[in-house]
Each structure stands twice: as structure tokens, then as C-alpha cells.
Amino acid sequence: MRAREGDLIKTKSNVVFDVKGLVHPPNKVIAFPRFIPSPQGTRQGKDTLYSKVYSLGDRFKYLQENHPDLIVFDPVFGETLCEIPTSQIAEHYQPPEKLASLRTSKNLSALENKALRLATALKEKADIPWSAIGISGSIMAGLTNEKSDIDPLVYGVENCRKAYSALQELLKTADSGFKPYSREELQTLFDFRSKDTQMSFEDFVLVESRKAFQGMFMGTDYFIRFVKDWPETNEQYGDVCYKNSGYAKITANIADDSDSLFTPCTYKLKDVAVVEGPKLTPITEVVSFRGRFCQQATNTEAIEAQGKVEFVTNKKSGREHYRLIIGNKPSDYMVLLH
């Protein structure tokens, strides 16, 4: 079974998890609970009501209370994760398959119709194949409610770059259906995200207002993830090992932002200074597995970031370095220095 960022899996205990990253242990999938069975839920599954869990803290709390066996310390990633044995997986949802079914369905909901229109507009403007696009999130799981948004994905480096350029154009086109967030809409987004990622509203507006992968489409929120395709990701589980080396705040300049579009996203750094925490060198990159940190900074911009420091050992090349990983704690952040 090959599962990747943007996929969802349902276990035999009827919990729907979202898959994290592209590298997984043998016969297991790293994923976190997203939709949980709940009598008070507002989302109707086939025969179960579901609630949605958002923050990482709430996800771990749910696991500790209901599925503690899925919480494991992973020796390769050097941290405690949720890992689901493939033997416990009942269903594997894949975004391209969902979009393909929307395209042939004669009975779409209003939200599904909107998602299909968004994907069609993006495909045509970017001139990419249907196989490079998918629809994820609550639409894919069949667990939408009146507040649900649209969660498209684009696959493949070249397709992703073309799609992002197309989005920048569509957001400037009056009748495209695409609209950038207003300041008021950014305030709503900030209020929601600040429970999980703390930064000032002005810092938030500075970075979020220029991201084309999020906004409104025909009055509904959208958030698009960009994921490298299988042939473009050659890391196997165990090729690279990660070891927790403390917690730090750094300042740096962005040396290379070419992988900042993708989930997981990477920023190569230069001129790094450790402001707080262990004075480890070289810290050469900032990495996040969370889509909210994509396109956070561009080449030559100066940043301040805070997160966990990891010692990275590449067993194939023998190279070693430190990286800062952000998005695991509410105190993690990355902002522009200005």
C-alpha cells in the first residue's frame, strides 16, 4: 500500500485519518485522526455521525483516550507519532479517484459541483492533465457539513508550478470565481489558526495575503496542497535518520525557496544565527509537514523561526546537518523580519 500526503484512510474502528508525508515505516502508515465517530457530530457518514478534530494536541488526546496502541516512538523520525498498521486499514481514499468520480457523477451536491468547477478551471488554465489533480478533505470522505471548504491537490513538480502560476492569474481575473482573502477573511483565518500557531496578526497578514493556494472560490474557502509525485521522492524509510536535538529560535536568510511550495515544505538557509536554544551548527534548513507553512518566505528574505532542532543523518551519502522543524507545537512559527 502506497499512501501519501492528502490521502485519507479509514480504520476498521471507523476513524478517518489524514496521511502525513510521503515516507512511512514498513506495513504502517503515519497519519493522524481527522474525523472521529461522535454521537454529537455534525457530519453524517453512511451509518455513523462524525466530529472533526483540528489541533495536533486534540488529535493526540483522542488517541490516548481511544487508541493508545497507535501512538509509537519512531526511531527513524526520532519522535512520537501515530502509526497505523496496514492490517487495521479498511478503506484508502485517494484524491485523484475522488475527482474522477465527481467528473462522471450525475448527482453532485452544491459543494461537490463547486469543487469540480474549481478543479476544471485550474486544469484548463494551468494546462495540466486530470491525473495531476485531486479533491481531498471532507468531500473525499463524504463527511461535509455547511461549513466545509474545498481541498484540492496537485501532483508533480512541474504540474504544481504551472498550477500555482495559473492560480496567481485566476485571482486577478474578475469573472474566474477565484478571489483572494480580504483583511476581514484573513482575520477569521487567523482566529482559527492562532489556537495552533501563535504569531501576531500583522505578521500573519504579511505572509498569508500573498499566498495564491488559498482564498475563496464562488464564496467557499479553498486550500490547495502541492505534492511531489512518486518518482520525484526517492527517500525510503530508514535512508535518513532524525534525532531530537532541542528547541531553538533562529534568524536566517532564505537561500533557496524552490521546495517551499510542496507539502512537506523545505527552505534552505544561509546566515543562520541561533537566538535562543542550543547553539548547534550547521542549521541548514527549515522544514514543515503542515501546509500552512508553504510559501512562507522567498529567496533573500530574512526570517525568524522557532521550532524543534533535529540532527539529520543521511545514511546513503553520509551527510549530516541540523534542521529546524516547525508546526508540531503552538509555539512554533516562522515570520518575516522587516
Image: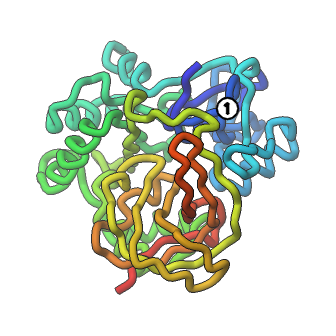
Picture quadrant where residue 83 is located: top right
Question: If the image is split into quadrants, where does the C terminus sit?
Answer: bottom left
Question: In screen coordinates, is 260 left or right of 317?
Answer: left
Picture quadrant where residue 311 is located: bottom right
Q: Nearer the viewer, residue 295 or 312?
A: 312
Q: Is residue 285 above or below residue 152?
A: below
Asked if residue 186 shows in the view, the reply is yes
Asked if residue 16 shows in the view, the reply is no
Q: Nearer the viewer, residue 338 or 276?
A: 276
- Look at 41% across and 31% down and name the residue there: 135
Disc 1 marks a residue whose amino acid type is: Pro
- The colour scheme of the drawn protein is rainbow
Question: In screen coordinates, is 301 left or right of 4?
Answer: left
Question: In screen coordinates, is 146 left or right of 14?
Answer: left
Spot occupied by residue 278 in the image (x, y as percentages of width and height): 66, 78
- Look at 65% across and 52% down and name the residue there: 242
Question: In screen coordinates, is 321 left or right of 328?
Answer: left
Disc 1, SS: loop
Spot occupied by residue 299 in the image (x, y as percentages of width and height): 28, 67
Spot occupied by residue 65 in the image (x, y as percentages of width and height): 87, 45
Q: Nearer the viewer, residue 50 or 222?
A: 222
Q: Nearer the viewer, residue 9 or 221?
A: 9
Name, please, the residue furthest toward the front: 318
Q: How many marks?
A: 1
Q: Is residue 119 above or below residue 130?
A: below
What residue did someone put label 1 on? 25
Spot occupied by residue 167 in the image (x, y as percentages of width and height): 22, 48
Question: If the image is split into quadrants, where does the N terminus sit?
Answer: top right
- Look at 71% across and 31% down and name the residue there: 15
Q: Is residue 144 above or below residue 47?
A: below
- Look at 75% across and 42% down and name the residue there: 40
Number of other residues with Cα within 10 Å of mark 1, as a class: few under 14, some 14 to 19, many 20 or more: some
